[in-house]
Amino acid sequence: DAGITQSPRHKVTETGTPVTLRCHQTENHRYMYWYRQDPGHGLRLIHYSYGVKDTDKGEVSDGYSVSRSKTEDFLLTLESATSSQTSVYFCAIRGVAFTGELFFGEGSRLTVL
Amino acid sequence: TQLLEQSPQFLSIQEGENLTVYCNSSSVFSSLQWYRQEPGEGPVLLVTVVTGGEVKKLKRLTFQFGDARKDSSLHITAAQTGDTGLYLCAGGEGTGNQFYFGTGTSLTVIP
């Protein structure tokens, strides 16, 4: 158990509404990541954080913002959700090994109608 | 940009058969990881390889990192129904801060 909790686990919302997904870790790890998973695309990196208030963009960051005000929490916000953002979102933390293994949460399934 | 391509995308085999999954890229990676994911759960790390030509074995699973560190393979010997799942490769870029995932191989082992 890597001590990662995602909330909510399931959410249905309408186009144009704001949505925030939360990732909480109990491991005090520095690096945290948000990925989305879609059929045929594997996992794609949205944003990642390398410390409190330190974040950077991934390969599919458009339409998403993140915040990290505490080590244990990494928030992903969709300011105005679109149907193309319907996906399963995974949070991950990076382990302490130099090779950087990732430990994932159980995912948050978001449906935008 | 999808940096890692996996093949095959889907694989259905009988229990006891052998199989190989490939992960290919035009990019060089500092490390390469293999994960297995079951429905409704997050991926779980199987192995990490870091040296070109490296071979690692995990019971019936054999992982190899290409000499040029651009590709990798996963070989399963005598597959079991418990091997069913989605297999994902992931490459670590130079600084080790970002990890790019392959498209995934969905394996079904039929009893």
Image (cartoon, coloured by chain):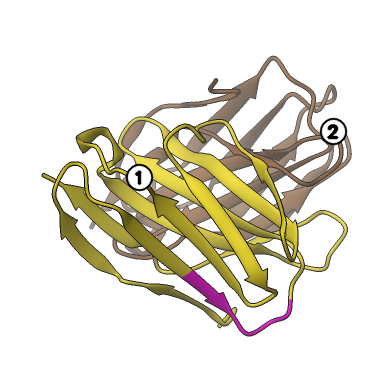
Chain colours: A yellow, B brown
Residue B105, picture quadrant: top left
Q: Quadrant of the C terminus of chain B?
A: bottom left
Q: Circle 1 is placed at which residue position?
A: B107
- Residue type, numbered disc 1: Leu
Residue B16 appears in view? no
Gap in angstroms between the C-alphas marked 1 and 2: 25 Å
Disc 1: which chain? B
Left or right of B63 in this view: A111: left
Span highlighted in magenta in the image: A23-28
B92 shown above or below A96: above
Pointer 1 and pointer 2: residues touching (CB < 8 Å)?
Answer: no
Residue B107, picture quadrant: top left
Classed neighbour count for the residue bearing mark 2: other residues with Cα under 10 Å, few (<14), some (14–19), many (≥20) = some
Disc 2: which chain? B
Q: Are marks 1 and 2 on the same chain?
A: yes
Residue A64 appears in view? yes
Q: Residue at x 37, y 47 (%)?
A: A79
Mark drawn on residue B53: 2
Left or right of A10 in this view: B29: right
| Front in this rendered view, residue A88 or B17 | A88
- Residue type, numbered disc 2: Gly
Q: From the top left corner, tell me how far across and down residue A14 is, in percent.
A: 13, 49
B34 shown above or below A52: above
Q: Residue at x 27, y 43 (%)?
A: A81
B78 shown above or below B64: below
Q: From the top left corner, tell me how far across and down residue A7 is, in percent.
A: 37, 73
